[in-house]
Amino acid sequence: IIEIVPKYHEKATLAEFCTREGVSADLNDFVNTGLFTNNTQQKRRLYDHQYEALKSAHVDRKHIVVTTGTGSGKTECFLLPVFADLVKESKTWTSHRQRAMRSMILYPLNALAEDQMIRLRKALNCHRDDKSGSLDWLDEHRAGNRFYFGRYTGATPVSGTKDKANPKLLEERRLHIADWNAAKEAAIETGNKELLFHVPCMENDSAEMWDRFSMQDNAPDILITNYSMLNVMLMRKQESKMFEDTKKWLEEDPSHVFHLVVDELHTYRGTAGTEVAYLLRVLLDRLGLEPNSKQVQFLATSAS
């Protein structure tokens, strides 16, 4: 089967967007360190729907649902508004800034969450030889602060309480370090640095949080999970600090906005959709929010 898909119309570069819409050029500078990098010198241009999604979400503060075809860059439609708020808020951060979940990204399948981790590692957790990576930018422009992110699913090590699970956590750390060192060696041998983004970075200044206990103690700015795990998190004491800290962050400043990203929106229908709808109501209540609050923003995508 051959499907002819017309090329999506390109509206403007991100730099042009920032100029037209009165957004700080820091957004363009940061996004081009990782999310928009490519192997050519040609600048990435926003498709019409990406431009409108970023304008509607970040500038006009509207909820958005993006329904475009497969391969149309829907992920950027919610990552750009999320990054824009992080870049803006981080101008005021000190080394003691409030840790909280600024964004939660819900996926129906763990495989989709894992694919997103590769994108986030490249966009948020990269050093480059010429000092043009995302971590290099944060070192220079945000006093070394990080945009922390982590995947919190059943596959995230390790389950149980910290005191009982510590030996297993140490073993997981050893395995992660071995994987990271193997990835670095393979990247050098093949010259393909993309291999570094397929495993968690285990350097001391990494922005990725790979274990449950670290995220329980200090919530990541971006949490990737699924509705099944979110349901468990809302019922247990282990994760309560993550929600309490996020609620505290929201109460600090009315301009703070919690982003709730729902990918593959069309999968939540029927009984399962009703269940997830109630689950999201519980989440918002836990954070001290109501669905019509100005401090929550819904960003959703669907190819259907």
Image (cartoon, rainbow, N blue to C red):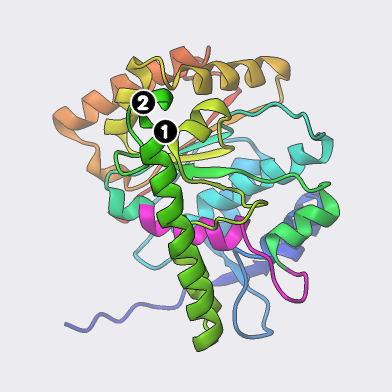
Image coordinates of residue 246 in percent, x first then y, are 58, 22
Residue drawn where x is 63% and y is 86% of the image = 40
Residue 118 appears in the picture as rendered = yes
Which quadrant is home to the C terminus?
A: bottom left
Q: Is residue 24 left or right of residue 63?
A: right
Please, is residue 174 above or below residue 259 in the view? below
Helix, strand or loop for disc 2: helix
| Rendered residue at 69%/84% (across/down) | 41
Specify the quadrant of the image occupied by residue 300.
top left
Residue 38 versus residue 55: which sits nearer the camera? 38
Say if 209 sits above or below 275 in the image. Answer: below
Rendered image: mark on residue 164: 2
68 inside magenta stretch: no
Amino acid of disc 1: Asn
Q: Residues within 10 Å of mark 2 (few under 14, many from 20)?
A: few
- The residue nearer to you, when weighing 148 against 280, is 148
State the residue position of label 1: 166
Magenta range is 114-132
Q: Quadrant of residue 257 in the image?
A: top right
From the viewer's perspective, tell me whether residue 162 is left or right of residue 52: left
Q: Is residue 152 visible?
A: no
x 76%, y 53%: residue: 138
Farthest residue to the front: give it: 167
Q: Secondary structure at mark 1?
A: helix
**Quarter of the figure that contains the N terminus:** bottom left
In the rendered structure, does residue 126 fall within the stretch colored magenta?
A: yes
- Label 1–label 2 contact, CB within 8 A: yes
Q: Residue at x 68, y 47 (%)?
A: 84
